């Protein structure tokens, strides 16, 4: 059993994020889903990003750090898209991390330190034609990160959707999500 902190994407803490967390809970894991937007949620990515831009990426990361202060340190940090920012930073810098799950995004390792902790297991998941992940350089950052990790995997799924794992959104891909969930559960059982 793992204890996981799952950070939401730029649309906020949606029903689809809660549903994904519930799937992990059904497998016996403890899952925390902090609401970094404090009740705000959006139907459209442009609206969500407008909110994020007003808030600031630094504030999103800070809120993620605050969300785990009262939690134990032996956590798996997981994030969807925007939520990868606090998840990756905490995994890279907070003592005791057990693993990282980065879904739909990855930033260069140098953003949070000199290197990825070699022994820290990580999985990165995205669609192979996602315009954000592939088109904005996340895929290169992911490959660099995986190269530094002793136990790292990058999984690419066919398609061009960014938040394909969120069942409450039109971009949801049930088949890709089922495979992703299977891989995530295997990852969690191995750490």
Image (cartoon, helix red, strand yellow):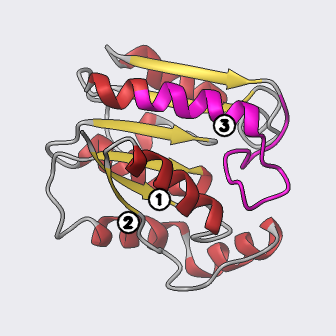
Q: Earlier in the sequence, mark 2 or mark 3?
A: 2
Q: Is residue 160 left or right of residue 73?
A: right
Q: Secondary structure at mark 2?
A: helix
Q: Position of residue 156 (x, y in %)?
A: 68, 23
The residue carrying mark 1 is 7
- Residue highlighted by disc 3: 177
Residue behind mark 2: 64
Q: Position of residue 57 (x, y in %)?
A: 53, 66
Q: Which callout, 1 or 3, points at the residue further toward the start of the chain?
A: 1
Magenta segment, which residues? 159-185
Q: Are marks 1 and 2 in contact (CB under 8 Å)?
A: yes
Q: Quadrant of the N terminus?
A: top left
Q: Is residue 30 above or below residue 37?
A: above
**Residue 43 at x, y = what percent?**
79, 73
For discs 1 and 3, the disc positioned in front in the rendered view: 3
Q: CA distance from mark 2 to mark 3?
A: 24 Å
Q: Secondary structure at mark 1?
A: strand
The foreground one among 58 and 30 is 30
Closer mark to the observer between disc 2 and disc 3: 3
In what element is the residue under mark 3? Answer: helix
Distance from Cα at disc 1 to Cα at disc 3: 17 Å
**Residue 172 among those drawn in magenta:** yes
**Number of on-image labels:** 3
């Amino acid at each position: 059993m793992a204890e996981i902190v799952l950070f939401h994407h730029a649309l906020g803490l949606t029903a689809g994020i809660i549903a994904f967390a519930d799937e992990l809970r059904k497998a016996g894991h403890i899952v925390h889903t902090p609401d970094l937007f404090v009740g705000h949620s959006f139907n459209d990515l442009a609206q969500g990003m407008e909110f994020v831009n007003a808030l600031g990426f630094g504030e999103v990361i800070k809120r993620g750090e605050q969300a785990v202060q009262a939690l134990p340190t032996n956590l798996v940090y997981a994030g969807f898209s925007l939520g990868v920012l606090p998840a990756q930073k905490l995994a890279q810098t907070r003592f005791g991390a057990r693993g990282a799950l980065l879904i739909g995004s990855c930033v260069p390792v140098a953003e949070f330190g000199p290197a990825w902790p070699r022994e820290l297991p990580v999985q990165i998941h995205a669609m192979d034609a996602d315009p954000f992940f592939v088109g904005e350089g996340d895929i290169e950052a992911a490959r660099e990160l995986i190269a530094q990790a002793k136990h790292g995997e990058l999984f690419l799924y066919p398609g061009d959707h960014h938040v394909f794992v969120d069942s409450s959104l039109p971009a949801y891909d049930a088949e890709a999500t089922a495979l992703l969930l299977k891989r995530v559960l295997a990852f969690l059982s191995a750490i």
